């Protein structure tokens, strides 16, 4: 019988759709993980819709929920996964919880998606309060083992701009120096050798050998762009990277190939269904572009590799 692997996932929750904990829970369960979901916000739907309602949790509410787990002695985890947060005190309290869990289990792995903003039409902007950035830089990233920023977030964390692959590698080295052994820049605006229709992602993993030496493996991936705005893809990416790095430790190439290939299948299925639902050739609505997660169960479980990673 396979040993139980348990994840504490602290991120957003929506009633309708697949972002945050809703995007992470199903794929992790399909891949054999037990997952406890703790919500940083709870909204009716994601903020890509015209309207949404809901609540943002604060640090007191987080502590109350975590205290309930502690009182029952069920706060024992192999992984912590975090994503979208909106409250500075809440984020700082997450770090306290991670540090406490790491004291209990020195092998615990903290996977952090530092959700802060993105770039549109060449212009980067934050979609969380700016006072979260120093908390990420000074408290969160130093205790993280795996981080999955996009290019804009990697630039924010490092304080350096990325215009070339060499600059991206230097930024990943800076992020390694802050704490994490695995850094994946999930999307960038670097021009792919395969042309403008491709999105480039870069990964870097420090492997610590028994003799104390450290080897760094770096990879690059090119993914075909899909002409649509999806929400929840970063949350899905971080969850699947957690799963595949667990199943393929010290092999970032294979873990990323399985993660990105599964993403490709989910997005292709989603855009195909969305276009079929959109009437008269209109652009699909946010509701029609919700990720087709359940329908993609087999692709999540055992993805056909359609994106190969290049070892740099």
Image (cartoon, grey):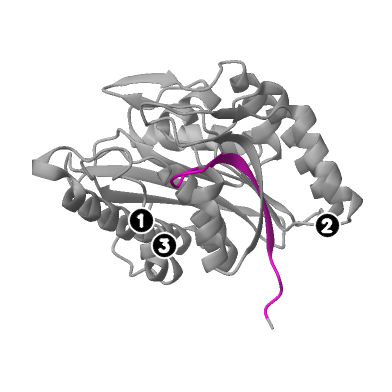
The residue sitting at the bottom extreme is 1
The vertical placement of 102 against 229, above or below, is: below
Q: Quick one: 292 or 195, which is closer to the camera?
A: 292
Q: Is residue 228 magenta?
A: no
Where on the picture, by quarter, is residue 199?
A: top left
| Label 1, label 3: how far apart the Cα atoms are | 6 Å
Q: Is residue 114 above or below residue 195?
A: above
Distance Cα–Cα, label 2 vs label 1: 32 Å
- Along the viewing direction, whichever of 292 and 3 lies nearer the viewer: 292
Q: Residue at x 46, y 44 (%)?
A: 16
Task: Name the foreground residue: 143 vs 165.
Answer: 143
Number of numbered discs: 3
Q: Residue furthest left?
A: 280
Looking at marks 3 and 2 on the same chain, the residue that comes earlier in the sequence is marked by 2
Answer whether residue 11 is magenta in the image.
Answer: yes
Which percent across, then down, holds residue 53? 51, 28
| Mark before the other along the chain sequence, 2 or 1 | 2
Q: Which mark is residue 74?
A: 2
Q: Is the residue marked by circle 3 packed among few (<14), some (14-19), or many (20+) residues within 10 Å?
A: few
Q: Secondary structure at mark 2?
A: loop
Stretch of the chain drawn in magenta: 2-19
Residue at x 17% of width, y 37% of height: 283
Q: Which residue is mark 3?
A: 294
* Left/right of residue 230 with respect to residue 8 in the rendered view: left
Q: Which residue does the image show at 33% across and 70% down from the upper left? A: 304
- Residue 4 at what x, y percent from top left? 71, 70
Residue where numbered disc 1 is placed: 292
SS label for mark 3: helix
Q: Is residue 303 visible?
A: yes
Would you say the residues marked 1 and 3 are in contact, meaning their CB atoms lie under 8 Å apart? yes
């Amino acid at each position: 019988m396979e040993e139980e692997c348990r994840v504490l996932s602290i991120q957003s929750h929506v009633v309708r759709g697949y972002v945050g904990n809703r995007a992470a829970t199903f794929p992790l369960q399909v891949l054999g993980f037990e997952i406890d979901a703790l919500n940083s916000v709870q909204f009716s739907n994601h903020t890509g819709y015209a309207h949404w309602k809901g609540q943002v949790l604060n640090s007191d509410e987080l502590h109350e929920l975590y205290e309930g787990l502690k009182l029952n002695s069920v706060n024992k985890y192999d992984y912590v996964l975090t994503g979208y947060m909106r409250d500075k005190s809440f984020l700082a309290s997450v770090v306290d919880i991670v540090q406490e869990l790491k004291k209990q289990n020195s092998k615990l792995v903290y996977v952090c998606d530092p959700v802060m903003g993105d770039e549109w039409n060449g212009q980067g902007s934050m979609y969380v309060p700016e006072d979260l950035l120093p908390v990420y830089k000074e408290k969160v990233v130093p205790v993280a083992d795996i981080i999955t920023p996009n290019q804009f977030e990697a630039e924010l964390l490092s304080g350096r701009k990325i215009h070339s692959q060499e600059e991206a590698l230097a930024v990943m080295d800076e992020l390694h120096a802050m704490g994490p052994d695995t850094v994946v820049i999930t999307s960038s605006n670097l021009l792919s050798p395969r042309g403008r229709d491709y999105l480039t992602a870069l990964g870097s993993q420090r492997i610590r050998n028994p003799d104390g030496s450290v080897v760094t493996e770096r990879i690059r991936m090119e993914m075909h762009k899909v002409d649509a705005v999806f929400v929840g893809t970063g949350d899905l990416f971080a969850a699947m990277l957690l799963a595949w790095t667990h199943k393929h430790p010290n092999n970032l190439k294979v873990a990323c190939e399985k993660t990105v290939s599964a993403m490709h299948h989910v997005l292709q299925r989603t855009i195909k269904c969305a276009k079929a639902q959109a009437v008269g050739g209109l652009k699909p609505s946010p509701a029609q572009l919700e990720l087709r997660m359940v329908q993609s169960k087999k692709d999540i479980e055992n993805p056909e590799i359609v994106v190969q990673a290049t070892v740099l």
